[in-house]
Image: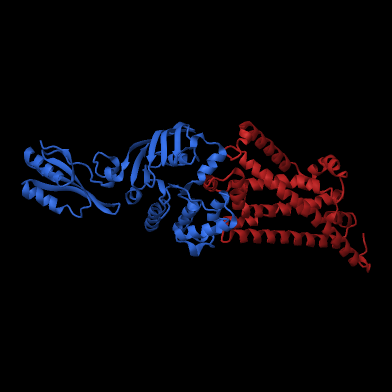
Amino acid sequence: MIDSSDPDFWPDLFATVWKATGETLYQVGWTLLLTAILGVIVGTLLVVTDKGGMLERPLGSRALGRTINVVLQLIVNLGRSIPFIILMIALIPFTRLILGTAFGVTAAIVPLTVAAVPFFARIVEMSLREVAPGLLEAGSSLGATRWQLVSKVLLPEALPGLILGFTTTAVSVVNFSAIVGTIGGGGLGDVAMRYGYQRYSTEYIVVVIIVLVAIVACIQALGGWMSNRMRRGGTPSARSAAEVPPA
Amino acid sequence: MITLEQVSKTFAARSGPVRALDQVSLEVQQGEIYGVIGRSGAGKSTLIRTVNMLERPDSGTVTVDGVDLTGLGAAELRRARQGIGMIFQQFNLLESRTVRGNVELALEIAGVDRAARRARSGEILELVGLTDRAHARVFELSGGQKQRVGIARALAADPKVLLSDEATSALDPETTASILGLLRELNRELGLTILLITHEMDVVKTLCDSAALMRDGRIVEHGRLDDIVLRTDSVMSRDLFPLGELPEPRGTAIIEITFVGLASEEPVISRLARTHELDVSLLGAAIETIHGRQTGRTRLELSGSAAQIDAAVADLQGQGLTVNRVREAA
């Protein structure tokens, strides 16, 4: 138990939480950057290599398209079904292999990204499937290449939905980032664990919660604002999708 | 300009294979507006989609502007498609772009540089009458404006052919008329060849030079509209001039007279009665404006001797009228 009447208590608390917040933001930021890139790639591949998709037969081979699709589906399903805390432990050897260490603020980016990519890829897949097929036909009728169809039609048209989905993903990543903190991943989770759990400091827990709530609220507000701005007068159903509670 | 030869296409459905196109051949002349009419499920949508290979036929050839599209590789086909614009019933505009952005999409795909895109999109938006809406978002537009954007996008890369897939079916009658007027104008001013499909006879009669009727994946009749209107045995012509069922036989003769460019049939009837001393009764009449001309068909019942009727028919034909003897006097 720490003595909260100690004159150094509050300065120490704020210094600790400030540093931990920086770590969490760093961790979450890098994870989201990697997730955005990989999730869009995987989600797009899931859609275009599916039956009737524009990349149904990459290099003229239906078998190749089918294989890519099945393998990616499997990976995404697997990644989504393993509880994060188990995935995180299972990935320790892999993290060590690519970063040389399995613990610490940076190392935690690996399991976080591995968990977030399938989550976001599935959302990307759903958003892209909602793009009316007629729009792709219109693009084809203008003589667009497959790359042009993806980059000029499919992704831009799905963008408002992608941003909302990314917002949900980001909130989950903040959540997961707190979990990695408990096994040496640093950040706010680590503070909550060390001060709140092991030393029973209610003040630390409360401040950590306030900071986390503030981060999540900022992410949600920013995502909702960007999506609405893009959609401008979009459909009510699309707006209510922004209200999906964090995982 | 567009030639389809023996084009067939079969789809696999749950209930078994569906032959959407059955040995369809079609010829659209340069500068012509050609309408394919039919009910839904007749195969007309598949037909128009084979013309730019959105639907690849199982057999047969599709030639546009002298190029056989069925034999092209992917890159060549993309280039060929830039010469074939297409507009859609649901407009298919990108919500993520402005009006101008949608038009420029066609130019980006065609590899036109930024400055030229600006210039061309301005030009084409003026042509469809949307200059003041260039910066509007798609959802701010009315249906008619959306289709104008669709037309502008389809024509931005300066194609020689425009395909119209039920382009006015989602629009109200007034807006339909203004879009059809625009298509006619573009056809005249740009020499644009237009192939359209529709289920509305109104579209065919106000716009088309030639027409074909599709049923069960086949073209059951086709021809120049001017010729079709004169044929009483034509299904399309019967749809144009619905005169109802024939009455029970009662010993009288029945003829149908088709008028082109005459305002009234009155003198004809009185002439039959006065000059040929026939009893004439009117069984039905329909008048349509086709290509801006009053065109009509009258069904008359004539009582008199066979010789009188022969003379009367010869007289009418001598005046340049098209007369069909539907039933002879008993």
Say whether residue B121 is left or right of residue A8.
left
How are the residues colored?
Answer: by chain
> Which percent across, then down, holds residue A21?
82, 59
Q: Please state which of residues A130 and B145 is positioned toward the viewer in this rendering.
A: B145
Q: Is B50 located above or below residue B95 in the figure?
A: above
Say whether residue A173 is left or right of residue B9.
right
Q: Quadrant of the C terminus of chain B?
A: top left
Residue at (51% x, 42% y) in the render: B80
The part of the image, by quadrant, that contains residue A121 is: top right
Q: Quadrant of the N terminus of chain B?
A: top left
Residue at (84% x, 48% y) in the render: A107
Q: Is A152 located above or below residue B214 in the figure?
A: below
Residue occupying the far bottom of the picture: A7
Residue at (69% x, 59% y) in the render: A220
Judging from the image, what is the letter of the chain drawn in red?
A: A
Say whether residue A116 is left or right of residue B118.
right
**Count of marks, rendered view:** 0
> Is residue A246 among the parts visible in the rendering?
yes
> Which percent across, then down, holds residue A204?
85, 61
> Which percent across, then down, holds residue A117?
72, 46
> Is residue B99 among the parts visible in the rendering?
no
Q: Please state which of residues A176 and B85 is positioned toward the viewer in this rendering.
A: B85
Say whether residue A86 is left or right of residue B121.
right
Judging from the image, what is the letter of the chain drawn in blue?
A: B
> Which percent across, then down, holds residue A132?
54, 48
Q: Is B258 located above or below residue B57 in the figure?
A: below
